[in-house]
Image: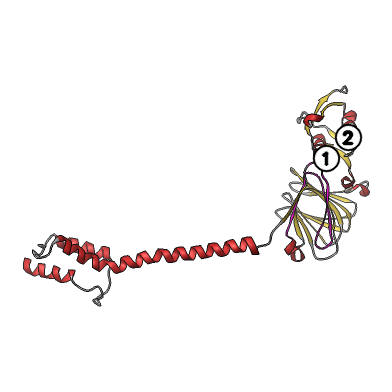
Amino acid sequence: MKEENNKKLHQWLNEPGDSGKPETSNGDRLKSFLSEASKLDVPAKRSKQDIWNALESRMEPTAKTRRLYHPVVWGIAASISILLAVYFIFISPKPLIIENDWGKISTIELPDKSVVKLNAGSKLIYYPDEWDKTRSLELQGEALFQVENGSTFKVLTELGKVQVLGTVFNVYAREKKFTVACQSGLVSVTNLDGDLSREIGAGQLAVMGKTQIQITKIADPIRIGSWQNGDFYFSRTPLSEVFGELERQFNVIIEFDTSQKTTYTGYFSNKDLDKALTNVCTPLGLAYSLKEKKGKVIIKQGGQR
């Protein structure tokens, strides 16, 4: 019986790999072999190395196939990476980013001849190559828009969206405050979720709230966007917001008690810091100390400087 089993083992080891029988994995065949091996005697004329060589020759085709698979995959992946890199570097549209430092107001002419006045500490982003298709831009801060007639013109901010055809309007989007003032034409104001939307006309102001958009009439529409000429008007505006504008216009840091709930109604010009501080502080009984070398202003209670 042992002699017959040994003969079967000898035949199995020398059986060609393409014998026509259904293929099984090398792992399954090895398990089968090891299961039977315990019952067999190794032929005396075959060394262990001979047996292993025979096993290895039967596994070689699968092993070679496995080795060839990885270079193909890596080659495809490398090709895709190169194509993506070429697209993003040479083909994909490039945004134009215009950012004003504190103390700077600039004028930008868009590809359709629309004009944007960008306030200090503000940023504008748009895609010149796609302008004719989109007429869309992103705003961070404040800008006055003079839009040429044409397709829908869109202003996107982190707090809300504005859509118009041809008009003049001012957008303020800082911190958590989002307002739109319309000087001429018709403006559509929408929140980011799209569930709040209102239209305003010339001389109206839209203030975005959490649950509604409040519409009010502007007492003096000619003052809309007056900041482009360096003139800033405020009506019952939180003092922190007024000081924030002073910082941006004069490129200074203002230190004051932020817990104050005081509001300010009045005006200042960005032509002279000392006069601007006087205009704001004196009516409110505040004193200021200007450290010009350090670019710092300290605001305190009391009328004495």
Residue type indicated by callout 1? Gln
Say above or below: 63 vs 160. below
Residue type indicated by callout 2? Ala
Q: Which residue in the structure is indicated by mark 2?
A: 276
Q: Residues within 10 Å of mark 1 (few under 14, many from 20)?
A: many
Residue 148: image x %, image y %?
85, 62
Which of marks 2 and 1 precedes in the sequence? 1
Q: Which residues are magenta?
A: 102-127
- In which quadrant of the rendered view does residue 297 lie? top right
Q: What residue appears at the point 17 percent right and 61 percent down from the top-left corner?
A: 49
What's the CA distance linking mark 1 and mark 2?
10 Å
The N terminus appears in which quarter of the rendering? bottom left
Contact (CB < 8 A) between labels 1 and 2?
Answer: yes
- In which quadrant of the rendered view does residue 12 lie? bottom left
The C terminus appears in which quarter of the rendering? top right
Helix, strand or loop status at disc 2: helix
In the displayed structure image, the side of residue 274 where residue 67 appears, left or right: left
Residue 252: image x %, image y %?
79, 35
Say above or below: 6 vs 268. below
Q: What residue appears at the point 25 percent right and 64 percent down from the top-left corner?
A: 28
Q: Which residue in the structure is indicated by mark 1?
A: 249
Q: Nearer the viewer, residue 268 or 56?
A: 56
